[in-house]
Image (cartoon, helix red, strand yellow):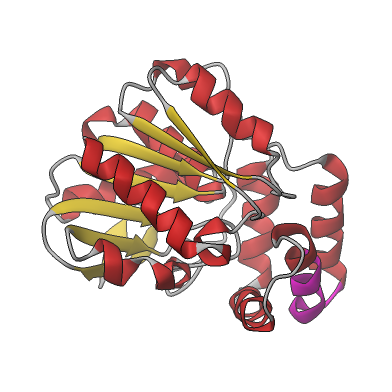
């Protein structure tokens, strides 16, 4: 299914019935990353996996300003309105967590709860990591760029199948849109001064070995958002939903069952 928003066409996949659970992926990925979650979550929830603009099967606008985090959050609000959803559980990972925070602040009526994974209140990718990514995007084929991402995102000892899956996700990207999101969307993101205003019940999930967004960023989120619950998954990097899906899924469902 595709939904027209302001300046983009957003692709999504729906499965299941019940309270809506919106899944928002991170940079360079798509709604397809939730391969270990959708079947399970849809047993009890109307699960909606979105492709953010610029990724997956959504459109890739080129205009300056198209990929600000606030703009991505408006796309999610537009989707919720178009589908006439009641307040949603909103799960965002990495950049998707940035989008979820912006959504909760701009449209609290959309968010029944927040589940913020491998994320933080600001763009905290270390400057050297960010510079290496931008340089690689501009100068190397996506196949080489993918190796850089894999080295940063996955904990040591990742299976060959998981490495191949991440590589395949990355090489499917459009370089222009990816670069624009990285330089235009992420670089300006900082809600550290506002996250204490978030009123939705919130779960924060961090990975012990996250090499992209330091776990301390998630701990800060959990400290600042009133009543937030923090869960750390041992032995995973930046992709806990794929590295240890059973532990990740249990943390998500335990929180949702508690509401």
Decide if residue 70 is on the left or right side of residue 82: right
Decide if residue 171 is in sight here. yes
At x 65% / y 56%, what residue is drawn? Answer: 180
Q: Position of residue 19 (x, y in %)?
A: 14, 50
Decide if residue 200 is on the left or right side of residue 187: left
At x 26% / y 43%, what residue is drawn? Answer: 256
At x 42% / y 64%, what residue is drawn? Answer: 51
Q: Quadrant of the C terminus?
A: top left
Q: Is residue 141 magenta?
A: yes
Residue 32 drawn above or below residue 226: below
Residue 119 drawn above or below residue 8: above
Between residue 209 and residue 217, name the one nearer to us.
209
Decide if residue 58 is in sight here. no
At x 32% / y 21%, what residue is drawn? Answer: 199
Highlighted range, magenta: 140-148
Q: Position of residue 133 (x, y in %)?
A: 80, 58
Q: How many numbered badges does the structure rendering display? A: 0
Q: Is residue 79 magenta?
A: no
Between residue 252 and residue 7, name the one nearer to us.
252
Decide if residue 137 is on the left or right side of residue 30: right
Q: What secondary structure is the magenta-colored segment mainly?
A: helix
Q: Quadrant of the N terminus?
A: bottom left
For residue 200, what is the image quadrant? top left
For residue 44, what is the image quadrant? bottom left
């Amino acid at each position: 299914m595709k939904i027209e928003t302001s300046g983009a066409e957003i692709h999504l996949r729906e499965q299941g019935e019940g309270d809506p659970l919106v899944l928002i992926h991170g940079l360079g990925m798509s709604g397809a990353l939730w391969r270990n979650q959708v079947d399970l979550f849809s047993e009890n929830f109307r699960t909606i996996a979105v492709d953010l603009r610029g990724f997956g099967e959504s459109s890739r606008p080129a205009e300056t300003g198209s990929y600000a985090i606030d703009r991505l959050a408006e796309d999610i609000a537009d989707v919720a309105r178009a589908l006439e959803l009641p307040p949603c559980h909103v799960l965002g990972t990495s950049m998707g967590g940035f989008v979820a925070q912006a959504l909760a602040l701009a449209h609290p009526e959309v968010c029944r709860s927040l589940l913020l994974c491998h994320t933080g209140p600001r763009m905290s990718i270390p400057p050297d990591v960010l510079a290496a990514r931008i340089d690689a995007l501009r100068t190397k084929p996506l196949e080489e760029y993918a190796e850089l991402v894999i080295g940063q995102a996955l904990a040591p000892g990742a299976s060959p199948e998981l490495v191949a899956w991440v590589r395949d996700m990355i090489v499917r990207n459009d370089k222009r849109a990816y670069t624009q999101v990285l330089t235009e969307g992420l670089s300006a993101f900082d809600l550290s001064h506002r996250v204490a205003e978030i009123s939705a019940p919130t779960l924060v999930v961090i990975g012990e070995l996250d090499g992209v967004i330091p776990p301390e960023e998630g701990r800060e989120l959990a400290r600042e958002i009133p009543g937030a619950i923090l869960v750390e998954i041992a032995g995973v990097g930046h992709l806990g939903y794929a590295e240890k899906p059973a532990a990740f899924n249990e943390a998500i469902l335990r929180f949702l069952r508690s509401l």
